[in-house]
């Protein structure tokens, strides 16, 4: 004998399938099939996989130590003597005689770590705040509307500040460190995830299966926690992919401004850019390598995130 919960589950599943075009497969399965046919998604996935592999294996495959000045006597910025790509050093040497290729490889791990941790901070805290606000509005009542109003006004204040300015303010308060960069960049992501999850939950709250379950007499809090919230996480997961690109760029910007790792000898793409600017006229490649690494990596996450968003959004599907 079927129960009210079983009926809600079937209604929720039917609604998801209908939003996907009426097929018998789930929304995520259909989205995956579209991703496999999307050149943009394939390109982004290839870039992401290469970046992750290099970040993980970088310390093991780097030919030299990223901080060892093994060729310090061969370079002399004062006399405009720089070493470009050669057999022993594929990308040449930096201004202090360190292997540029090794520093670029090791820097990938730090960029990945900062991007993932910062996005995780923004996702967890933002989803928690947005979930509370969305649940309060979905449950209805004066108390729910007041909770939503207070929470959203705080989020609006955070959104009113430019992202980099907000990150700089947080970093300046906490102090210079790698953890500071993670917290600062994660703080910038919080209002984005909160707003997105709240809006998605409000849209789900008006779905047919929610109206039907209310007609069956199911309590609202059960509907919100068991069905509205899980079905609202899709856009938030997509945003997490896109936010990784932004997190990597913001982290590099903070490191470039001197708010990252206090150890300037540690390889990090933003620090490498900052150190290369003094020699841009004599050795432009020292700035080109880390800049290209940042651009290509961010582009990979952006392409994959946009393709995933299109595959999940009925209005954007091809």
Image (cartoon, rainbow, N blue to C red):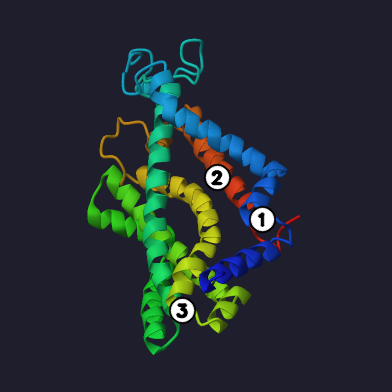
Q: Earlier in the sequence, mark 1 or mark 3?
A: 3
Q: Residue 309: tell me if it is visible.
A: no
Please name which of the two marks, 1 or 3, marks the residue nearer to the observer.
3
Q: Nearer the viewer, mark 2 or mark 1?
A: 1
263 vs 303: above or below: above
Q: CA distance from mark 1 to mark 3?
A: 31 Å
* Residue positioned most to the right: 318
Q: Which mark is residue 310?
A: 1
Residue that label 3 marks = 220
Q: Are marks 2 and 3 in contact (CB under 8 Å)?
A: no
Q: Sequence-wise, which precedes: disc 2 or disc 1?
A: 2
Placement of the C terminus among the 4 image quadrants: bottom right
Residue at the (25%, 47%) spot, across then down: 176
Mark 2 to mark 1 CA distance (whole Å) = 14 Å
Q: Quadrant of residue 315?
A: bottom right
Residue underneath mark 2: 301
**Pick the front one: 104 or 138:** 138
Residue 141, percent from left and from top: 42, 88
**One can see residue 176 in this view:** yes
* Element type where label 2 sits in the image: helix
Residue 155 picture location, percent across and down: 40, 71
Which of the 4 image quadrants contains residue 238? Answer: bottom right
State the image quarter where residue 267 is shown. top left
Q: Are marks 2 and 1 in contact (CB under 8 Å)?
A: no
Q: Residue 49: horizontal and vertical position, in percent?
A: 54, 34
Q: Percent position (x, y) of residue 260?
A: 31, 43
Callout 3 crowding tier (Cα within 10 Å): few <14, some 14–19, many ≥20:
some
Q: Residue furthest bottom?
A: 142
């Amino acid at each position: 004998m079927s129960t009210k919960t079983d009926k809600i589950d079937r209604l929720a599943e039917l609604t998801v399938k209908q939003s996907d075009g009426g097929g018998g497969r789930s929304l995520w399965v259909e989205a995956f099939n579209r991703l496999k046919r999307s050149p943009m998604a394939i390109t982004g996935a290839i870039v992401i996989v290469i970046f992750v592999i290099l970040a993980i294996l970088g310390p093991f495959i780097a030919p030299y130590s990223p901080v060892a000045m093994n060729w310090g006597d061969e370079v002399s910025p004062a006399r405009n003597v720089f070493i470009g790509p050669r057999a022993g050093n594929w990308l040449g040497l930096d201004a202090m005689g360190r292997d540029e290729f090794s520093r670029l490889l090791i820097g990938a791990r730090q960029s990945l770590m900062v991007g993932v941790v910062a996005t995780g901070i923004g996702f967890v805290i933002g989803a928690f705040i947005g979930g509370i606000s969305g649940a309060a509005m979905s449950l209805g009542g004066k108390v729910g509307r007041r909770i939503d109003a207070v929470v959203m006004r705080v989020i609006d204040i955070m959104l009113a500040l430019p992202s980099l300015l907000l990150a700089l303010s947080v970093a300046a308060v906490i102090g210079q460190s790698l953890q500071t960069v993670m917290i600062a960049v994660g703080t910038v992501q919080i209002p984005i995830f909160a707003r997105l999850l709240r809006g998605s939950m409000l849209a789900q709250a008006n779905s047919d299966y929610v109206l039907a379950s209310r007609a069956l007499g199911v309590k609202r809090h059960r509907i919100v926690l068991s069905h509205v919230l899980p079905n609202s996480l899709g856009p938030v997961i997509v945003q997490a992919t896109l936010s990784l690109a932004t997190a990597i760029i913001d982290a590099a910007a903070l490191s470039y401004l001197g708010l990252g790792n206090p150890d300037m000898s540690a390889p990090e793409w933003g620090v490498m850019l900052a150190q290369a600017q003094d020699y841009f006229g004599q050795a432009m490649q020292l700035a080109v390598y880390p800049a290209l690494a940042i651009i290509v990596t961010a582009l990979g996450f952006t392409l994959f995130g946009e393709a995933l968003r299109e595959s999940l959004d009925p209005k954007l599907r091809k």
